[in-house]
Image (cartoon, grey):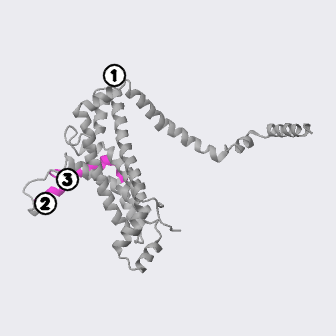
Amino acid sequence: MSSVPLDGVAAAAGIEEALPLRIKLAARGLDGTTLLVLPAFLAIVALFVYPFLYGLWLSFQPKDGGAALSNYVRFFSDPFLYETIGTTLRIALPVTIVNLLLAVPIAMRVRLMRRQRILTTILVLPVTLGTVLVAEGLLNYLGPQGWFNRSLMWLGVIAGPVKLTNNYWGVVASLLITGFPFTFLLTLSYVTGIDPALEQAGAVHGASARSRFFRIVLPLILPGLAITFCLSFVQAFAVFPSAVLLGAPAGPTRVISIAAYQAAFEEYDYSLASAIAMIMGLVQFALVAAVLAGRRLLYRGPVAGTKG
């Protein structure tokens, strides 16, 4: 009786060995569809994982020798370096908040329009132009001899040109123009995902438009707004061309990306530049983690409504 199971196992093993390799891999979840993920995985490793790990390792290899944490000690002991964190946050946070505050009411209005595609196409244009071209346009428009200043002087509103470029406000204006379409499109995707029946039910029960927004719409889009805030903040925090072309790179708008650039291509200290890049990433990660953690304290429901 004991020989029967053994013969069955041997027969099953023989059948398995006779199967083609394709069927064996499919039985283990490695079919053709799964293998389509392989190029994307290799691209992520080559373009993101490996550079990050190499930069992290390089940051612990000081150019002039010394302890492994020498670059980090140098950064946080030099006000000219560590103050760039505060400078970058003073630019990125207001821009992100303003873009989000503008995007929500506009998205609420646009979702009721019939021709959304035309408006969204127009809003995408600043993204396709790029930050450098937008910065050049702002220099011609907001500069001392730009159209804006000349129009105000011609109307007699001001006696002399107002300084709107090569300072903090020039960088903020550039980031608002290039960052708003991105923030708006993400917000619109969350707003249009809400089932209109939910608001209609609130209106039937006598809720005002303000009450329906704060009690129905906002809780539903809040998780999505948190994600939009994080993505918009990361985009604004990495500001570089605008800070150079429209700001004062050696003064009020010396952001942390400029410090990393100067360390790498002016001092040729790639180890210090890598350390600054790691600190830059850590600051972004800390704020993003705080926002996502705070989102759970406010609302734990679905990201959007029950539309569809």
State the extent of the magenta-drawn residues as a range.
Answer: 127-153
Rendered image quadrant of residue 105: bottom left
Dot 2 amino acid type = Leu
When the figure is inspected, residue 181 is found, relative to residue 89, above or below; the finding is below
Asked if residue 148 lies in the magenta stretch, the reply is yes
Q: Is residue 61 left or right of residue 136?
A: right
Q: Earlier in the sequence, mark 2 or mark 1?
A: 1
Q: Which mark is residue 76?
A: none
Q: Residue furthest right?
A: 1
- Please rate how many residues cluster around mark 2, counting C-alpha atoms within 10 Å: few if below 14, some from 14 to 19, many from 20: some
Type of the residue with mark 3: Leu
* 175 lies left or right of 192: left
Q: Is disc 3 placed on a helix, strand or loop?
A: helix
Question: How far apart are the alpha carbons under marks 2 and 1?
Answer: 53 Å
Residue of label 1? 63
Quarter-of-image position of residue 82: top left
The location of residue 121, given as percent across then percent down, is 40, 61
Residue placed under numbered mark 2 in the picture: 152
User: Going 37% across and 39% down the picture, which residue do you hit?
Assistant: 282
Please tell me the numbered disc located at residue 142: 3
Task: Inspect this view and state whether residue 139 appears.
Answer: no
Magenta region, main secondary structure:
helix
